[in-house]
Amino acid sequence: MAGLNKTTLLDWYRQMVLIRRFEEKCAELYQQGKIGGFLHLYIGQEATGVGSVAALRPQDHAITAYRDHGLALARGLDPKAIMAEMLGKRTGVSGGKGGSMHLASRELNFWGGYGIVGGHLPLAAGIALKAKYNEEDEVVLCYMGDGATNIGYFHESLNLSAVWDLPVIWLVENNGYGMGTAVDRASGQVELHKRAVGYGMKDGGRVDGMDVIAVYEAISDAARYASKNGPVLMESMTYRFQGHSMGDPERYRSKEEVQRYAAGDPIGKFRQTLVEKYKDVAGELDKIEDAVVATVAEAVEYAENSPAPTYEDLVAHVYAD
Amino acid sequence: MASNVQTGEKPITIREALSAALREEMLRDERVFLMGEEIGVWGGTYAVTRGFYDEFGPKRVRDTPISEMVIAGAAVGAAMAGLRPVAELMTINFAFVAFDAIVNHMAKVRYMFNGQFKVPMVIRTTTGGGKQLGATHSHSPEAVFAHFPGLYVAVPGTAYDAKGMLKAAIRDDNPVMFVEHSTMLQRRSAVPDDPDFVLPIGKSDIKREGRDVTIVTYSKGLEWSLAAADILAKDGIEAEIVDLRWLRPLDMETVFQSFKKTNRCVVVEESLPMFSVGSEVAAQLQDKMFDYMDAPVKRVNALDQPLPYASEIEMMALPDANKVVAAVKEVL
Ligand SMILES: Cc1ncc(C[n+]2csc(CCOP(=O)(O)OP(=O)(O)O)c2C)c(N)n1
Ligand SMILES: [Mg+2]
């Protein structure tokens, strides 16, 4: 925990709780029919998201798949505008045209959620190429699920990043499943980080994705490496506590398994760490939790009161003028 | 200077025109770079980029592995981030491998993130059959790409157009599929050597004036149509030839104006007939020009099946000037 002060750690705690409460609210709004389409919750993976984004500098870049709410919040996108996107409002981060899977902020170098498994990996390589081409000190953190490591994009993108020495961290968020398919039913090499060898790139190993501090440290190391030497492949071992998306009957895993992981809830664990480290911090943590509840309520209110997109919005931005 | 290109008053080939366009744009704008298979050390499969690697170096002339998905996708990312990639897919037959990156990301990232990103990139590729390459290497599927809003699709048929259109494509902030015909690279025409010679995007061009029939065509179809017009002229039939030049944006206005004069139309293209440019032009004509129609719209396309190896039967399957003549005679 060297160099991590209390303010920073409490802010991470706030972010993790914000993701949790925000998504619980999204699930509720989905049940009420106010959020449509697909909704993929990040609940259980908060430590991976918050710890990794915390390791980025403002000039660095993040890009991910459709399970993107947690990362968008961690990267500092306004919860109000994210919630408005969920509800399909014109004040949403993507103007109500992207939806839950397609959150982005050009300003914050959050290059989006992408709905095609693996489809964003080559984009990450291209963004990193920009940095290298312009000799800018920037790193791209490209998130993907364990399932995404089996699509052709993975192979082509990782190989190109190695051939061109691109500053990318390829981070596999291994939550055990791609939809209902367990990793050992989909991948010959189940230690996914080891595929780095096949590309001649640095193997960044595995990190405990339920431990926000461990993730922060591992990604910080990887970022330092990537900015000087080129790509790193690494794996964050995590678990999603909810179904793949809303309405998943979860026939592929047992309740006992889910409970076992839930016992190691990354938020509960981090709270424990903080309580042990700082005497009398419990009251502060409670205050943070209350503030987060208020933030989520404000976001919902903002979103509900925002206007729907118009016909002009529908037809705008197919092309650049 | 290692470039083999000389533009000027004398006619140059399409290959030289493309090469000159790329070179001028690279000299004009540092953000423009090339990436693709065998474009650098080898000098380009069709020699369009011969000499570029020596002149511009490996940073701006980037040889890639055989990885169409990441060629297209990395160009999208680089373009979103502010570079201006000109990616090359060796031939359009291999663009199918990159289809997702083209259709889902090249065409859509601007829209789905509500205009936060621009995608100023070009994918150059070659189309066409007639080279005895068999079924997998002889496609002309440019109309498939024109199906998707968010993309522009360029299909030049002369050196003049190739140069002005490629420069326009590189300078524009939208993603362009730039489709060159692999058997036309040696065709010559006069091309301005003004480095700011740029043609408008989405503007067709009347390549021959006539009063009796409108032939709508593009790319290799232009050649068959011009030859057919010469044959028809001997019988006193004057064909007007509209070279679309772009399949998206599709300039139907010029077609409509011509049709109002001729009241007859034949669409000539190398692609397969079903769901083709011909289908689209015919549909729009019956919708908007019904009152001017004196005959059904005819389409001249490749036969609706895969292309074979043997030259005798490959040529049977492809359009030619005689087939265009026959189609025109049917509508007169
Ligand atoms: C190319 C493609 N194939 C299939 C799908 C359908 N699909 C959506 S998510 C998913 C599972 C992906 O699993 P993983 O990469 O592990 O990410 P996770 O959902 O666990 O975060 C599948 C098969 C898709 N979106 N894209
Ligand atoms: Mg997974």
Image: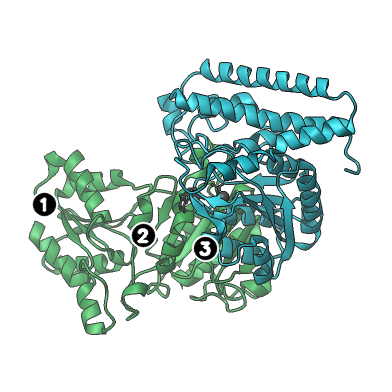
Chain colours: A cyan, B green
Say which amino acid is labelled 1.
Pro
Q: Is A179 situated left or right of B33 in this image?
A: left
Residue B142 numbered tag: 2
Of badges 2 and 3, nearer the viewer stands 3
How far across and down, in percent of the image, does residue A130 sit? 68, 54
**Residue B13 visible to the viewer:** no
Mark 3, other Cα within 10 Å: few <14 / some 14–19 / many ≥20: some
| Callout 2: SS | helix
Co-location on one chain, circles 1 and 2: yes
**Image: B76 above or below A83:** below
| Callout 3: SS | helix
Co-location on one chain, circles 2 and 3: no
Per the image, the residue denoted by label 3 is A152
Per the image, the residue denoted by label 1 is B296
Q: Nearer the viewer, residue A162 or B188?
A: A162
Question: Which quarter of the rendering shows the N terminus of chain A?
Answer: top right
Co-location on one chain, circles 1 and 3: no
Spatial CA span between label 1 and label 2: 25 Å
Say which amino acid is labelled 3.
Gly
Mark 2, other Cα within 10 Å: few <14 / some 14–19 / many ≥20: many
